[in-house]
Image: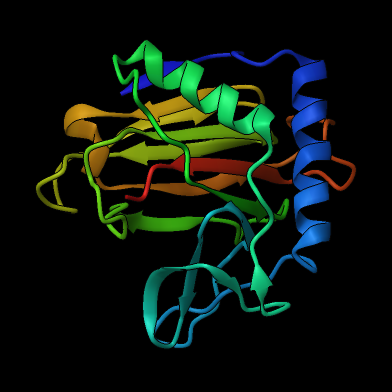
Amino acid sequence: MLHLKSYFSVSEQQNLVEITRNIAKVNGGMIIPVMATGQKFNCSQTSCGIVGWLSDRTGYRYSKINPVNNQPFAAMPTELIDIAQSLAKLVGEFDYQPETCLINFYPANIKSKLGLHQDNTEQNLKPCIISISIGDDCSFVIGSNRSRTDPLKGIILRSGDALILHGDSRLAYHGVQRIIPKTSNLLKNNGRLNLTIRQVY
């Protein structure tokens, strides 16, 4: 795992916010997905790239069609592709192909969290996962790739941080315990924006 603190300048972060707003606009807005149990997520989502990540009553999967507007997901902007490939090179992945970016928005309240999970929906589980944090700080936890009951390490992810899960950490259990309100004024209504870039195939 590679945690790059303050990797993005404030102006770069502001540009990323505009990029995500444009993606959401093209996609017809963001949705609050549900799990297979019917329970709602604690964040709203959208995606860009050749596929988008979905969760509903049928489970987790990637799809070429956005259920909001029944159209292909917005293309991944070249800025995101360039950022992802530059970051992947830092962990020795020189042929990294960014194929999707999942955008999560966590509102600034105590219920904003993401349970412990593995990122294992991709067909190719070797390429790294790149996570970009914008807005309020969050309490992030990560464990091993063996069991969700193994000990967890806590990290504070702040606006402008980049986190790369690669090697053994690629399939590590991880989650967001909580958002720490009013730790950033970058987003108009506070909260946290997270961009997760993956190579799917």
Left or right of 63: which side holds 194?
right
Is residue 81 shown above or below 150? above
Q: Where is residue 201 in the image (x, y as percent from the top left)?
A: 32, 50
Query: Could you tell me residue 138's position as x and y percent?
Result: 56, 38
Q: How is this picture coloured?
A: rainbow
Left of 65 or right of it: where is 3? Answer: left
Q: Which residue: 51% across, 42% down?
A: 196
Name the foreground residue: 120 vs 84: 84
Q: Where is residue 90 in the image (x, y as percent from the top left)?
A: 38, 11
Q: In this view, does 3 lie above or below 138?
A: above
Q: In the picture, residue 127 is in which quadrant?
A: top left
Above or below, 143 relative to 37: above
| Numbered marks: total | 0
Residue occupying image coordinates x 47% and y 87%: 38
Q: Nearer the viewer, residue 182 or 53?
A: 53
Residue visible at 47% across and 56% down in the picture: 114
Q: In this view, does 121 lie to the left or right of 51?
A: left
Give the quadrant of the N terminus: top left
Q: Where is residue 200 in the image (x, y as percent from the top left)?
A: 36, 50
Residue placed most toward the observer, 168 or 85: 85
> Which residue is painted at 75% across and 45% down in the image?
20
Res. 95 image quadrant: top left
Q: Which residue lies furthest to the right in this view?
A: 188
The residue positioned farthest toward the left in the image shown: 146
